[in-house]
Image: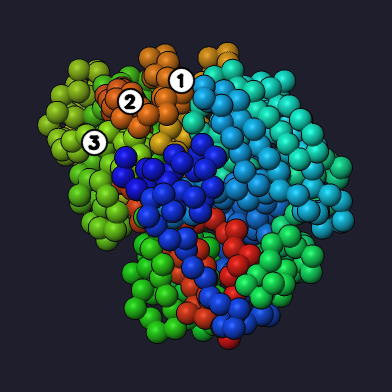
Amino acid sequence: MDRREFLRYAGALGVSASAAYATAGLWNPRRASAATIRRGGVFKVSAEVLKLAHPSQISWGRQADQLEQLLEPLVIIRDDGVPRPYLLENWQASDDLKTWTLNLRKGITWNNGDAFTADDVVFTFKQWMDKSVNSTMRTLFGPLMSSSGIEKVNQHQVKLNLDTPSIGVPFFLYDNRALVMSHRTFEGDILKNPIGTGPYTLEKYVPGERAVFKARKDYWQKGADGKPLPYLDGIRFIDLGSEAAPQMAALRSGDVHFIDLTDVGGVEYWKTLNKVKGIKTIAAPSGYCNVMRMRVDMKPWDDNRVRMALKLCQNRKKILGLAYFGQGVLGHDTHIFPKAAAYCKKDIPAYNPEKAKALLAEAGHANGLKVTMSLPSDVSEIVRFGEILKEDAAPAGFDIRLETMPSSQYWEKWLEVPLGVTAWAHRNLDTQVFNQAYSVDENGKPVGWNESRWVDPEFNALLKDANATLDVEARRKIMCKLEEIQMTRGSVGISYFANGWYIVRDTVMDLEPDPVRTFTQPQMWLSA
């Protein structure tokens, strides 16, 4: 293992972050000293303010970024990929990886004064596992355990008794939806009773307009000066729409400190702002990608020859260069980040319209094929991808009509369109997105976010094995087979994985990046 892999797996098995860093010969990230830090100020964020109700049902990172000011995860992961305790004090895994003991941090209170206890954790897990809630957290934990496997040991300890061994538990606990809810107060809509353990209280939430958070005075984490975090007086999310121009203008003028790019690659923002005085761009290489996916339960995409033909029409270097200014790494139609621990290196498929044309003819479309591709009109790199593919697929016989619509409309129907492009965020564990987007439930039906409805028994059997394999090299051998299956008979085309960025005013201090670009940042402060 290299150092990154060592830290990742040491963290997963319950070794403390400081011990893992010491063993690997690395230092913990350093923050400013108490003498330097300035308290006060309101941090202003340009971000769409979307509808909210159940935290376990949210779909987008922007929703999570706002909720994370109020609610918190059990585990946190930063840019080195190491899971660290957050609401947990620590955890331990049994040798067979089937029993995970979660030890809760003591002395934490909800913002109404209630104590944070094991009852809250058990309640939250059961919400995740409840079929009626329909949370994607169930796609992570459902294949591993049933609700009866969630055991309260005492007020500060919970055990997860898995049916299937898994290395993934700590990684899954930092999903966008893995936010802990109060068992006493939560009744399905967090906005009706906004009780959380987070550093802020929710003052106002108006979809399409703003979300306003005010700092708590009794938050459980302490700053460098020994006083409770956060350093800020508050955070305000301001909905300026999804168009880039007004958001960039607001950042330039100082009307906002930060543009939330969690759900977009952000290359247009980076290209425009990366050399602007007063603004800094913090790179976050990630598994963010735009996934061209085909509904295999709809014609013509039920025929793998047609799917393969369209994938062969991707001129990947051209797409990355023109759609994303070369800021990323090429993909090979399988949904695993090339820097993931157990990634299996594959050759990048060449652009081959001649072979694609032959496959179309073999599938009964010798005279060509007309298809419609649905795209969000306000995500420039996705629209550019569609334009390039339309042009490069024509010699193969594809006549692609581009159906563009605002994101607000697209995301209402993203699971239903026959051919579309979906932006997928980074996942920290190599098998995680396979579980969320390409697996089946206990009845053999596609899980909730299996947007292409693709079901492959061999793939799912291998995925189960990969989820239970700790050794990196052993799991890499399984991943090689999984990747090959998805490349040759899968339902998606992935041309590249994109760099992401935090783009902020240079007065923003101690922001700690991670590939998911989440916003659990109580240690952040403003220099002026």
Q: Is residue 429 left or right of residue 330?
A: right
Separation (CA) of disc 2 from disc 3: 15 Å
Q: Residues within 10 Å of mark 1 (few under 14, many from 20)?
A: some
Identify which amino acid the numbered label 1 is placed on. Answer: Lys
Q: Residues within 10 Å of mark 3 (few under 14, many from 20)?
A: few
Separation (CA) of disc 3 from disc 1: 21 Å
Q: Secondary structure at mark 2?
A: helix
Count numbered badges in the picture.
Answer: 3
Q: Residue at x 61, y 39 (%)?
A: 91
Point out residue 468 in the picture as x, y percentages from the top left corner: 46, 23
Q: Which of 502/465 is in front?
A: 465
Identify which amino acid the numbered label 3 is placed on. Answer: Lys
The label number, if any, that marks residue 474 in the structure image: 2
The residue under label 1 is 464
Q: Is residue 60 left or right of residue 252?
A: right
The label number, if any, that marks residue 482 in the structure image: none
Q: Which of 524/350 is in front?
A: 524
Residue at the limit of the structure toward the left, as seen here:
354
Note whether 214 is above or below 261 in the view shown. below
User: Which of the marked residues, 1 or 2, is nearer the chain's N terminus?
Assistant: 1
The residue under label 3 is 345
User: Which of the marked residues, 3 or 1, is nearer the chain's N terminus?
Assistant: 3
- Evaluate whether residue 289 shows in this view: no
